[in-house]
Amino acid sequence: MSAAKVAFHRYLVYAALLSIILLSTLFSLRWVQINVVLVGRDSAGHLEQSINTAEALAQGGLTGIFQAVTLDDYRPPLLYLLTQPAYALWGRSMDAAQAPNLVLFALILWLTFLLARRVTGDWMAVFAVALLSLLPMATAMTRLYYMENGLTAALLLALYALLRAEHFTRRGWALLFGAALGVALLGKWTAPIYLIFPVLYLLGTGGFWRQQWSALRTLRVNWRAALLAVIVGAALAALWYIPGRAFVLDQEMPLGDWLPVLWAALFAVTLYALFVGGGMIGNIWTALLVALTIASLWYFPRFDFVNRLSDVAFGTDRGTQQSLDLLRLSTYTRYGEYWLTHHMGPLATLVIAPVAFIGWARRIPQWRQARPTVIIYGATVVGAALVLTLLAQSNPRNLVPLLPLVAILLAEGLRSFSRQVAAVLGALWIGVLLVQWSIYTFDELAPLQARTPQLWVYGDYTAWPASGSSAPGYWIGPDVLATIGSPEGDAESLGMLIDAWEIHRGTLRYLAARDQLNLTIAPLTEHTDAGWGDLFANRWLLRKDGDNSAVRAPGQALLARIDAGDPLFDQLYTPVKRYPLPNGDTATLYRRDGPRQPRAYPVILIETAPIAEALNAWWSPGATLVFGDRDIAVWTAVHDLTADHVLMPGRDGAGFPEPLEELSGTIFVISRYEHAARDAIAADSYFARTVVSGDTALDVFGRPTQPLAPLTVASPWDAITVDALRSLPTLAPGEVLPVELEVTRHDTRPLKLSLRLLAPDGSVIAQNDVPADPAVRAGLLLPPDAMPGEYTLGAVLYDPAAGVDLPARTGEQLGRLATVRVNEQH
């Protein structure tokens, strides 16, 4: 072929390649610009952390850089760091944040071409790039804010450098491999999974073990280079660590002040390898040390991430997944299902997979002559898939770094057919994938997917720009936050009772971080054990009706209690705004009065904790809880109250929803500074007991629903005579036993009666001390768990001034007055 034809051929190839990259980038950019709804849960967390990273960098200097690199305690920082130039250029917006992934995908397509050209030739390499550009998850990771594009680009660069290093004999490419591997590790901790097999293959076929043994036998230390490496390494470690030391201590990083020691040692070893390394063995270790040095910037400070990592890899990841079970069939089929549902789709799989398998099968007889690069690509895909299968954590995103190699292997499969057949089959593949790609790129094609859903991919990440789960009507977050505001002083508090793919707390947390709002957002719907009290700790609540199946059990319990008409919730919270959603559900924003952050005031919480504990212990069906004011209702409600009949003053000075004088049965009154309700109830009720904690008090009263009856009474003392006793002959657990005594005093001392109710076994289950006046009026609270039977009403007569008891005529401390019957709880 003449030089002119070669140049023209190259021009056409690169024109086609650049056209694919340009069109893919432009259409993804169009998708990003149209889309307003943040798609995905992890993506929201990533966006929030990118804002936090920007805030860290705003401090300036190495202090800001150190914090930005080590900010997240679980996820490496590559994506967040790559986003910062876009923020600097275009501001902190979702669209700006997506710029790195758009650029990275263009780089991925270019690297795919370079890798494919090594085995397929120019035009089949372009074909592989076209396939990759149309794969649903590849485009989804470009349009959404996830880490996969950064990881994939770094891995492809590492693989390309690995191949160009020619068994690590070319030092520059070997070092580039190490640098790319280090960057990949800063992208995601799963990076080694995708490179371990090609590295082992090249080491095995390159005679590594033999040369390594030989190198160990002839090892000589260059002491001058070693001393220089130690000095420079220590200086670099100090330069990096000292500006960030305060942050290390504040974050309680596990290695603490051991970090500069470890960095100094690692930097010194790496520098020594760079100074004196050479040859295959030297290049290998230098490359790995470079990778470890780059990765150590995050992995050393955040070494404790391994605790979470082990739970993610083999456990339940805090209850969000099934733990690893090698006997469960789905362990081995889940990634195949992901390929069918998320990556290729049923129709495309049916059209592409059989042809590719036939093409590969036709090459089996010549497997001994297979090109090493093809073996490396295949081993990378199969090996990584095998390792992923043996991990508990599973996600269709885990296959994204393998997609470029899969596209190359698919193109390689076509090469076993004649050129004409391969062209027809390739056009068919591109056509099917192009239709599928178009369906999720243009909202106008959403009806086609709705009519034929069984043909196409589906899942959380295949979203339209402005239809379905990404319809603009779901983007209520900005208006919700604008309604809440950002006050001075205590932060506003929002409790999230929505956990849907379209609306969840991550979105609002990102928006609050972006706009620097003085707001806390609490998850009430996730795997955490959110209780009833956690709900009331939030001044604002966002919930929706309709399908709440994604809400976990604790959140479901909260929603069920609200739907049942809980009086405490209904009186404290008022609907402020309703948002009709595209799927027919309605989201509602609620607001309560009272403190914004009640749990930020431990003194008051310490006061109200024993009050709530006593109330919950004594509560029984049919009882009524009355709060003296609305603030004390909030301070007490944060302790998980079980009360189901609650009254409090209305807003803006309005009265109680029920007249206090009409209440009956057992009445609990909690008051702090406002005692009007307590006094009103006490005026015509039977006081049973009280708990006082600081300025807060719980008083228990009884108002019987039937008239008191005279009971046969004994008069067991000489100092006083009990002339009459009126009470109820029967009562139920949780009720207050009203007691009225007529007493004649024979002693001038101010005596008191300790009224007591004794269970059949003689144990005291209720007590109330009152003056031994001529007319005694009191109550005894029967515990809600009291068993049915005959109970004894008695009293201890004592002189409070002298602190002595006056025994009954029988010589016993307790004088027995009468018996009452306790029935079963209705």
Image: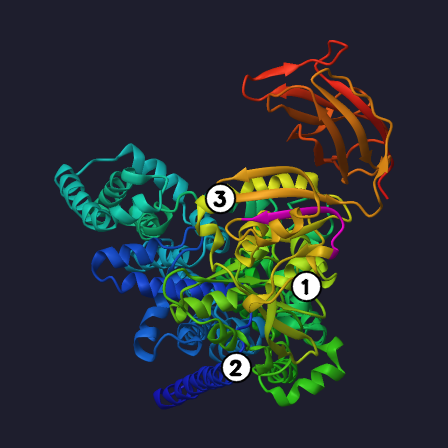
Circle 3 Cα neighbour tier, 10 Å, few/some/many (<14 / 14–19 / ≥20): few
Q: Which residue is mark 2?
A: 35
Disc 1 designates what residue? 657
- Seen at 52% across and 74% down, the residue is 480
Comparing 190 with 756, the one in front is 756
Picture coordinates of residue 472 (x, y %)?
57, 82
| Residue 579 figure quarter | bottom right
Kind of residue sitting beneath label 3: Asp
Describe the element under mark 3 as helix, strand or loop: loop
Horizontal arrangement in the rendering, residue 548 relative to residue 177 (left or right): right
Where residue 522 sits: x, y (%)?
52, 58
Specify the quadrant that holds the N terminus: bottom left
Mark 2: which amino acid? Asn
Q: Position of residue 717 (x, y in %)?
A: 74, 17
Circle 3 is placed at which residue position?
Answer: 695
**Residue 665 part of the magenta segment:** yes
C-alpha separation, residue under disc 2 versus residue under disc 3: 54 Å
Up the image or down, 229 lies above or below 154; here it is above
| As drawn, 240 above or below 350 | above
